[in-house]
Image (spheres, rainbow, N blue to C red):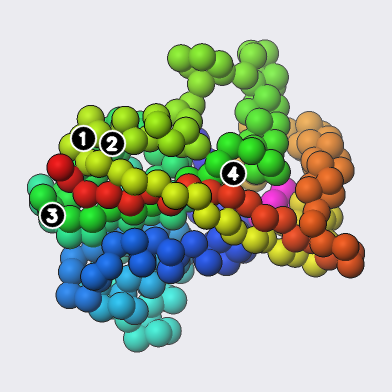
Amino acid sequence: MSNWDKGSYEITAAQISPAAPAVADAVEPVAGQPALDLACGTGNVALELARRGGEVTGYDGAPRLLQVAGERAAAEGLSLERVQGDLSELPFADDSFEIVTSVFGLIFTSSPQDSAAEIGRVLRPRGRVAFTSWIEEGLFQYMQDMARAAVASHFGQAPPEGSDAPFSWGDELAVRELFSESGIALQVETRELVIEEESAKELNDRWFDLHPIWITMQEMIGDAAYEEMRREALPVVESHNEAGDGSFRNTLRYLLFEGSPV
């Protein structure tokens, strides 16, 4: 389980921030509506909803990230309620929210089934939900597979497969079926997000030095194995570089799910 208070998730949050308006667009109208942003992190979507007049609650398990979200809201003169807790057990009454959102946050829940059920419970009968997940391909997929293999190897195990594998948030049908069990019908579309950095090495080092997931993994597998992973990852990052001027650019595809209770 990653400690999201470690490192500096703000850097990654800035890179994925263009997805926030897309999610907010998917749940309009927002003004005057109670909205819950799950795994809100530094507040990308929560603040976007607040800018549009929503009555927003940002929910996250990491106290430091909630503090950052609050500071960002205060700097813009926005109202943002913040609540700390687990994605699989929401501390809100039934039918509390007209809107529920998440940008690349719900995908980290420890229990997809429980989280989907909780969203169905707190969402009003005519409410709207929208969230994003990564398509399992390309650079992010490689990095994810490498991390799982490294942790499994450290503990003398094989990477989880079959029924033991983590839920596939990149599987459109699986996600739609998961939420249908909680009474929510979803539509999905594919979007693109471009991440940029000064160089491939700069991006690789930022991930290994600052990303909470990677820092947590370093504590698990030790410094020597971690530095070897850093060296192995760099040529892969370089191979996904679409820029031709020495900088780094990579186009990532993601899924935007949106829907309502039925």
Residue plotted at (45% across, 28% down): 167
4 and 23: which is toward the camera: 23
Query: Disc 1 to disc 3, how far (Cα)?
Result: 14 Å
Residue plotted at (57% across, 66% down): 14
Query: Disc 1 to disc 4, how far (Cα)?
Result: 29 Å
Query: Start and end of the magenta stretch?
Result: 207-211
Query: Which tag, 2 or 3, sits closer to the chain's start?
Result: 3
Residue that badge 4 annotates: 213
Kind of element beneath mark 2: helix
Residue that badge 1 annotates: 182
**Quadrant of image for the C terminus:** top left
Residue that badge 3 annotates: 126
Q: State if disc 3 and disc 1 touch (CB < 8 Å).
A: no
Can you give x and y, in whole percent of width and height, for residue 248 in the image? 79, 61
Kindly report the secondary structure that dominates the magenta region of the rendered protein. Answer: helix
Residue 5 as seen in the image, left or right of residue 51: right
Q: State if disc 1 and disc 2 touch (CB < 8 Å).
A: yes
Query: Which tag, 1 or 3, sits closer to the chain's start?
Result: 3
Question: Neighbour class for label 3 at 10 Å: few (<14), some, many (≥20)?
Answer: few
Where residue 179 is drawn, which disc sits there?
A: 2
Kind of element beneath mark 4: helix
Query: Disc 2 to disc 1, how far (Cα)?
Result: 5 Å
Query: Is residue 21 visible in this depiction of the protein?
Result: yes
Q: Nearer the viewer, mark 1 or mark 4?
A: 1
Residue 16 as seen in the image, left or right of residue 177: right
Query: Disc 4 to disc 2, how far (Cα)?
Result: 26 Å
